[in-house]
Image: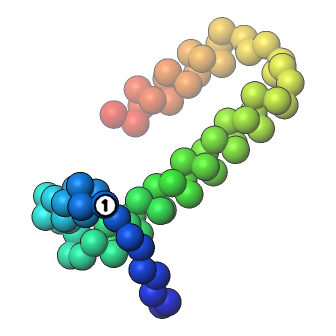
C-alpha cells in the first residue's frame, strides 16, 4: 500500500476525527478509504443509470408480469 499526504483545513480535520470516533473507524485513513470507495460506487451507479436512460424505450410489460413478481416475493416470506 502506498501513502498519500493531504492537507485539510482545521475544520475538516476536526470533522474527520469526529467521524473516526463515531463511525467505528480505526484511523482517519480507513475513513478516507471508505469515502473513496463510496464515491467509486456512486460513479458506477450513475454510469449504469445513464446507460439505462439512453438505451431507448423498453417493450411494454403485461400486468401479469407484475403479479408474478408479487407472488414470488410473497412466497419468500
Q: Secondary structure at mark 1?
A: loop
Query: Residue 37: image x %, image y %?
Result: 48, 62
Closer to us: 73 or 17: 17
Residue at the spot 56% in from the left edge and 15% down from the top edge: 67
Q: Is residue 76 above or below residue 56?
A: below
- Left or right, 47 with respect to 39, comes to right
Closer to us: 56 or 63: 56
The quarter holding residue 17 reads bottom left
Q: Is residue 11 above or below residue 8?
A: above
Closer to us: 75 or 9: 9
Residue lying farthest bottom? 1
Q: Is residue 16 visible?
A: no
Query: Residue 6: image x %, image y %?
Result: 41, 73
Image quadrant containing the C terminus: top left
Residue lying farthest top? 63
Closer to us: 29 or 63: 29
The quarter holding residue 51 reads top right
Q: Is residue 18 visible?
A: yes
- Left or right, 49 with respect to 11, comes to right
Q: How are the residues colored? A: rainbow
Residue at the spot 67% in from the left edge and 36% down from the top edge: 49
Amino acid at each position: 500500500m502506498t501513502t498519500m499526504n493531504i492537507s485539510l483545513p482545521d475544520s475538516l480535520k476536526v470533522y474527520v476525527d469526529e467521524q473516526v470516533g463515531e463511525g467505528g473507524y480505526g484511523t482517519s485513513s480507513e475513513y478516507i478509504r471508505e469515502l473513496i470507495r463510496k464515491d467509486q460506487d456512486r460513479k458506477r451507479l450513475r454510469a449504469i443509470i445513464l446507460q439505462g436512460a439512453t438505451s431507448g424505450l423498453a417493450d411494454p410489460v403485461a400486468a401479469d408480469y407484475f403479479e408474478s413478481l408479487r407472488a414470488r416475493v410473497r412466497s419468500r416470506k
